[in-house]
Image (spheres, grey):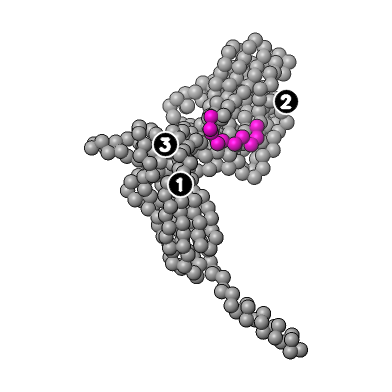
């Protein structure tokens, strides 16, 4: 019994010697707005909601030079927050030049993360002083890609609420037709090519900077061709979670026949729903995906010309509308 009591007493002494775990959490957030890093605006904030003081180390990593540009240590007392100011980490030689970085952040209570950003030389003031912008280099995980054209949801909102586009094609045009690939309905990330030679059609695509240091990851491909809007089948996807392809016999890079595969129909609809993961700034130096302005004058005119190729729209699998006689 004495041995058992002594053992229990020893265990209690060991437990009492272990410090209580700090309650709460540490949150690290990145400034979302575009700002001039030379102004010292807040680049990131560390909020310590625990009951213990913490130390924080931030390494500024230059993705182009592949070096740690700066190491910044600081303390955040319990129940407070710290706003780390921005700085210009490298002078860029020409207007439009871009350099990407990330903040590698580690705290004394073992919170670790990386926050990605880019700095861009956008111009000069009246005294020829450079003006910079710092942007969050947003990562878009498992986002969908469509070829440029009308949105299904704009023409038939009852059909889908997804932002997928389709491209009306005139296959009597011999040679190459090229259309933009738009990811997340936000950025133009590549091109799709429709090559027509006689009766044979081949559809291929590429993402910008593939094979040239770009970091866009192709996750999935889907291509379909429909003879009319009434034949359309739209992927019933759950964004970021599930991507299920409708049945299709068409593949990128595989030739098909207008006569045998399309029944001779030369006015068709191309539906693309690829899936990619990508950064807004896809390479460390001087690259960014261009913003997709769907309602620009050029895009509005192109969309109108595409719609003129189509037959009158009939809802897929919709029953005929019967107007009762008076």
Expressed as whole percent of the image width and height from the top left, the position of residue 265 reads 67, 16
Sequence-first disc among 3 and 2: 3
Res. 150 in view = no
Crowd tier of the residue under label 2, counting other residues whose Cα lies within 10 Å: few below 14, some 14–19, many 20 or above? few
The nearer-to-camera label among 3 and 2 is 3
Q: Distance between the residues labelled 3 and 1?
A: 17 Å
Q: What element carries label 1?
A: strand
- The residue at the point 34 percent across, 50 percent down is 40
On screen, residue 221 versus residue 189, left or right, reads right
Q: How far apart are marks 3 and 2 (CA)?
A: 42 Å
- Looking at the image, residue 289 lies above or below residue 116: above
Of 75 and 254, which appears nearest the observer? Answer: 75
Is 303 magenta? The answer is no
Q: Which residue lies furthest to the top in this view?
A: 198
Quarter of the image with the N terminus is: bottom right
The residue stretch that appears in magenta: 212-221
Crowd tier of the residue under label 3, counting other residues whose Cα lies within 10 Å: few below 14, some 14–19, many 20 or above? many
Residue behind mark 2: 249
- The residue at the point 62 percent across, 33 percent down is 273
Q: Distance between the residues labelled 1 and 2?
A: 50 Å
Expressed as whole percent of the image width and height from the top left, the position of residue 170 reads 59, 17
The nearer-to-camera label among 3 and 1 is 1
- The residue at the point 56 percent across, 74 percent down is 19
Residue behind mark 3: 98
The answer to whether the residue labelled 1 contacts the one labelled 2, judged by CB atoms less than 8 Å apart, is: no
Sequence-first disc among 3 and 1: 1
């Amino acid at each position: 019994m004495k041995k058992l009591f002594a053992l229990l007493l020893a265990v209690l002494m060991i437990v009492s010697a272990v410090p209580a775990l700090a309650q709460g959490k540490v949150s690290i957030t990145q400034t979302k707005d575009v700002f001039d890093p030379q102004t010292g605006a807040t680049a990131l904030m560390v909020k310590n909601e625990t009951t213990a003081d913490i130390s924080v180390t931030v390494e500024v990593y230059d993705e182009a030079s592949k070096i740690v540009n700066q190491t910044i240590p600081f303390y955040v007392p319990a129940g407070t927050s710290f706003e780390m100011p921005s700085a210009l980490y490298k002078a860029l030689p020409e207007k439009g030049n871009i350099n990407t970085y990330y903040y590698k952040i580690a705290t004394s209570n073992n919170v670790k993360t990386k926050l990605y950003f880019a700095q861009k030389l956008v111009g000069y003031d009246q005294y020829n002083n450079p003006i910079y912008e710092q942007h969050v280099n947003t990562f878009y995980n498992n986002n969908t890609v469509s070829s440029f054209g009308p949105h299904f949801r704009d023409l038939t909102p009852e059909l889908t609420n997804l932002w997928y586009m389709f491209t009306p094609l005139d296959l009597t045009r011999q040679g190459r037709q090229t259309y933009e690939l738009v990811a997340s309905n936000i950025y133009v990330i590549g091109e799709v090519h429709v090559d027509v030679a006689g009766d044979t059609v081949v559809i291929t695509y590429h993402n910008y900077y593939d094979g040239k240091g770009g970091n866009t990851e192709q996750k999935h491909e889907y291509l379909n061709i429909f003879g009319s809007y009434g034949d359309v089948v739209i992927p019933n996807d759950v964004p970021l979670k599930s991507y299920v392809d409708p049945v299709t016999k068409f593949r990128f890079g595989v030739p098909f026949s207008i006569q045998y595969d399309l029944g001779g129909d030369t006015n068709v609809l191309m539906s693309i729903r690829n899936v990619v993961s990508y950064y807004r700034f896809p390479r460390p130096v001087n690259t960014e995906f261009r913003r997709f302005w769907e309602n620009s004058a050029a895009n509005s005119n192109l969309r109108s010309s595409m719609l003129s190729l189509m037959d009158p729209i009939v809802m897929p699998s919709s029953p005929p509308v019967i107007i009762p006689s008076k």
